[in-house]
Amino acid sequence: MKEEQQKASIALEEIIGTIRSHARLGQAIRGHENTGGNLYIFLEERTLRCPELADWLKRRDKWLSVDIQNEIIEIMAHMVQRKLIDKIN
């Protein structure tokens, strides 16, 4: 069980890192279809060096849903806001 959690954590870090990179560059992450956007294409490329991500993507397509992508971006935005507020205070 612990090994499975570790693999899931690695895969999630890859997904979040990819979303963060696209957000920082102002790039679109979604395409017209679930598998046609920049996010999916970049994650597919990352699977070449991250077998944990490859396994995760085969089993868990809901981690790439529009709602999850938006939630991850929203959490990142809140983190940036908190850092800015801390700097101001």
Image (cartoon, grey):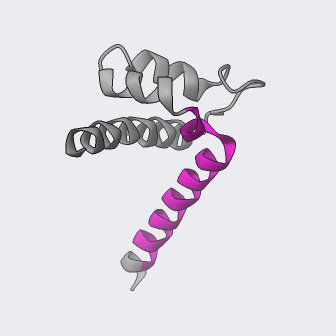
Most foreground residue, 18 or 53: 53
Q: Residue 69 at x, y = what percent? A: 60, 45
In what quadrant of the picture does the N terminus appear? top left
Say if the magenta span includes residue 68: yes
Instruction: Give the dominant element type of the magenta stretch: helix, strand or loop.
Output: helix
The relative height of residue 38 versus residue 19 in the rendered view (above or below) is: above
User: Is 79 rendered above or below residue 49?
Assistant: below
Using residue 11 as the reference point, say whether residue 24 is left or right of it: right
Give the extent of the magenta segment. Answer: 61-85
Residue 8 falls in image quadrant = top left
Instruction: Write the residue at 60% across / 48% down.
Output: 68
Can you say whether 77 is above or below 33 in the image?
A: below
Comparing 84 with 32, the one in front is: 32
What residue is rendered at 68% in x and 31% in y?
30
Q: Residue at x 52, y 67 (%)?
A: 78
Quarter containing the C terminus:
bottom left
